[in-house]
């Protein structure tokens, strides 16, 4: 398991702690990929940095969710944040849409963002391709979008997703933005927009935020379907809220193969995925035991899966219990987000005021 030992406090020139900011889009519930890839890292930073974590409900709107589902997802994720160990006293925890300054600065920042660079963003191309049902990855996607008659399917919010994300980050003048590999390009755009703003207005106003380097490769949490990473849209997830029976069932049904035929054969992707999951939750001796059993062909995947389920439950069950405790405590949750919004708005309103001033929007 990861520990906090390697996280050293870092201060800015003014003596204050460096600012960490990250967010998770509110679609559905949080899964193990979110937990190991993001949340557990957020928790590791909370003692030594000025951390601000939010629920990106405006970003969720870009894919037009059902309103009732969006609302319940925000609440679920908030409860899951706290249950996973994010302390509302140590961090600023807020909902993106509670900070109107973000929406205003998004409008202002869009004046310095090119539609070409937005259309070339990988995440946009992928989402647009999916929405329009285009299979090939031809570079003709731009033409397809412009010519497409179904205007609602690729909306302008989806295109300007990176502007909104840059504003989330820059409005806090964040130093570090712990995100997965899939968000690196957005972070790169954030730095680019910051530089462009600075150079246009001849100022050094924005710094250039970077990912948080936890040392070592960013880990990818694989799904249970034998393919790539765990993801909501892939339907291969274990959720923090899954009950014991559901979790066991999912693990027992995970894709494997026919088993090794010869000693020391290479491990196929689906089986390697199970070992990777074990690497997150099981003791090294236990993992070695199954590695050895694979190498000498005595492995039984059923046993490996039972062990994996057992070890996963040790991590998820305490979190699940806390989620259930918190989730229906509306009074507590609304207190948390109210306090979070107040604290986040202090920072956001200061930045927005200065940005307006720099851009020439000044009182008469
Ligand atoms: N785009 C991020 C994701 O899908 C979520 C996000 C929105 C975010 N704004 C952010 C992450 C600002 C870090 C910082 O995972």
Image (tube, grey):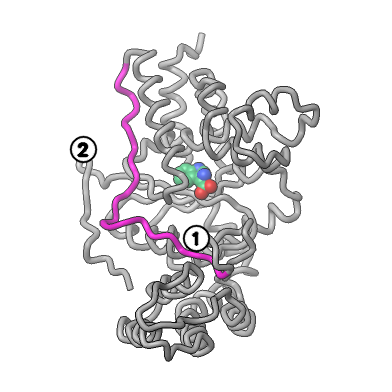
Residue 206 on the magenta segment: yes
Q: Residue at x 46, y 63 (%)?
A: 221
Residue placed most toward the observer, 168 or 342 = 168
On residue 14, which mark appears?
A: 2
Going by the image, does 274 lie left or right of 149? left
For label 1, the residue is 34
Q: Residue at x 40, y 64 (%)?
A: 40
Query: Label 2: how many residues lie within 10 Å, few (<14), some (14-19) or many (20+)?
Result: few
Which SS class for mark 1? helix
Residue 298 on the magenta segment: no
Q: x%, y% of residue 45?
A: 32, 57
Query: Label 1: how many residues lie within 10 Å, few (<14), some (14-19) or many (20+)?
Result: many
Which SS class for mark 2? loop
Residue bounds of the magenta highlight: 203-224
Q: Quadrant of residue 156?
A: top right
Q: x%, y% of residue 257?
A: 54, 76
Q: Quadrant of residue 77?
A: bottom right
On residue 199, which mark appears?
A: none
Which numbered mark, 2 or 1, is in the foreground of this view? 1
């Amino acid at each position: 398991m990861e520990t906090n030992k390697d996280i050293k406090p870092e201060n800015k020139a003014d003596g204050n702690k460096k600012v960490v900011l990250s967010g998770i889009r509110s679609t559905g519930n949080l899964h193990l990929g979110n937990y190991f890839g993001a949340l557990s890292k957020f928790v590791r930073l909370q003692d030594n940095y000025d951390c601000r974590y939010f629920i990106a409900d405006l970003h969720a709107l870009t894919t037009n969710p059902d309103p009732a589902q969006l609302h319940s997802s925000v609440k679920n994720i908030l409860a899951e944040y706290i249950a996973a160990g994010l302390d509302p006293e140590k961090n600023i925890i807020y909902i993106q849409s509670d900070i109107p300054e973000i929406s205003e600065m998004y409008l202002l920042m869009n004046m310095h963002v090119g539609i070409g660079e937005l259309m070339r963003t990988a995440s946009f191309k992928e989402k647009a391709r999916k929405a329009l049902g285009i299979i090939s990855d031809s570079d003709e996607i731009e033409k397809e979008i412009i010519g497409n008659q179904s205007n609602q399917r690729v909306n302008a919010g989806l295109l300007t997703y990176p502007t909104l994300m840059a504003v989330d980050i820059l409005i806090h003048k964040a130093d570090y933005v712990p995100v997965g590999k899939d968000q690196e390009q957005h972070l790169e755009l954030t730095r680019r927009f910051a530089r462009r703003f600075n150079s246009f207005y001849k100022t050094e106003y924005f710094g250039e935020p970077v990912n948080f380097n936890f040392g070592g490769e960013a880990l990818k949490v694989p799904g249970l379907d034998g393919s790539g990473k765990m993801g909501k849209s892939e339907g291969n997830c274990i959720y923090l809220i899954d009950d014991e029976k559901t979790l066991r069932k999912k693990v027992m049904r995970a894709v494997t193969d026919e088993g090794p035929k010869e000693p020391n054969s290479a491990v196929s992707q689906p089986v390697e995925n199970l070992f990777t999951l074990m690497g997150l939750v099981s003791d090294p001796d236990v993992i070695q035991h199954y590695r050895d059993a694979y190498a000498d062909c005595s492995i039984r995947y059923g046993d490996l899966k039972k062990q994996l389920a057992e070890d996963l439950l040790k991590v998820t069950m305490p979190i699940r219990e806390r989620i259930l405790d918190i989730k229906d405590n509306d009074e507590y949750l609304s207190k948390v987000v109210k306090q979070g919004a107040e604290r986040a708005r202090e920072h956001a309103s200061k930045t927005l005021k200065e940005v307006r001033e720099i851009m020439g929007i000044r009182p008469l």
